[in-house]
Image (spheres, rainbow, N blue to C red):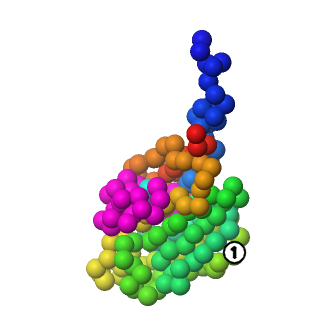
């Protein structure tokens, strides 16, 4: 009965604008489960984390590689909407100085959903004493917010991990 009084912003907020596919196969977890306060505390932005089961990071959507960290453990991928995702493989893995990572892309590359971005050696990273849990952070985003998180077992390129909606 009162639905006609809702503002258009509220109606837009309820409709998903973008679903983000998992870039990794593994177990998706709350960002607060990441053993690093910078990520767990939301200081880098909001998002989700995945404990990977295999060492292959794929593009979760068609986009442009905005930046690749020179140590190959992280990158920023930009969607055509302007949304950016920081994909950060492991915790403190910058200390590996690229060892155990094979990067298949460079800054400025146009990528397709499902395309392999980085391959990494899970066993070598863990043997060096680092956690492989991978934060996936929404950055560079003034228009949308995370409307839903999808936790549990995920398959790269098939299962959705985040649903974004219009900010109110």
Residue 86 in picture, x, y percent from top left: 52, 66
**Residue sitting nearer the eye, 62 or 12:** 12
Residue visible at 60% across and 53% down in the picture: 142
Give above or below for 148 relative to 137.
Answer: above
**Residue sitting nearer the eye, 6 or 116:** 6
Q: Give the side of residue 32 with respect to residue 116, left or right.
A: left
**Image quadrant of residue 127?**
bottom left
Residue visible at 64% across and 64% down in the picture: 78
The answer to whether residue 138 is seen in the rendering is yes
Over which residues does the magenta segment extend? 22-47
Image quadrant containing the N terminus: top right
Residue 159 in picture, x, y percent from top left: 52, 51
Q: Give the side of residue 155 with respect to residue 129, left or right.
A: right
Residue visible at 55% across and 48% down in the picture: 145
Residue visible at 31% across and 83% down in the picture: 128
Residue 114 in picture, x, y percent from top left: 61, 63
The residue where tag 1 is placed is 109
Image quadrant containing the C terminus: top right
Q: Residues within 10 Å of mark 1 (few under 14, many from 20)?
A: some
Tally the numbered discs.
1
The answer to whether residue 156 is seen in the rendering is no
Residue 27 in picture, x, y percent from top left: 39, 56
The secondary element bearing badge 1 is classed as: loop
In the rendered structure, does residue 104 fall within the stretch colored magenta?
no
**Image quadrant of residue 104?**
bottom right
Q: Give the side of residue 89 with respect to residue 82, left or right.
A: left
In the rendered structure, does residue 24 fall within the stretch colored magenta?
yes
**Residue sitting nearer the eye, 9 or 103:** 9
């Amino acid at each position: 009965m009162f639905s006609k009084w809702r503002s258009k912003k509220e109606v837009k907020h309820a409709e998903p604008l973008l679903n983000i596919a998992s870039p990794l196969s593994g177990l998706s977890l709350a960002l607060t489960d990441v053993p690093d306060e910078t990520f767990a505390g939301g200081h880098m932005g909001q998002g989700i984390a995945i404990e990977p089961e295999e060492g292959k990071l794929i593009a979760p959507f068609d986009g442009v590689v905005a930046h690749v960290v020179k140590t190959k453990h992280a990158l920023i991928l930009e969607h055509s909407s302007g949304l950016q995702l920081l994909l950060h493989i492991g915790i403190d893995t910058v200390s590996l100085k690229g060892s155990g990572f094979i990067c298949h892309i460079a800054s400025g590359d146009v990528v397709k959903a499902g395309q392999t971005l980085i391959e990494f050696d899970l066993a070598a990273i863990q043997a060096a004493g680092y956690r492989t849990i991978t934060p996936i952070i929404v950055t560079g985003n003034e228009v949308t917010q995370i409307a839903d998180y999808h936790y549990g077992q995920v398959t790269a390129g098939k299962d959705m991990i985040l649903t974004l909606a219009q900010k109110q």
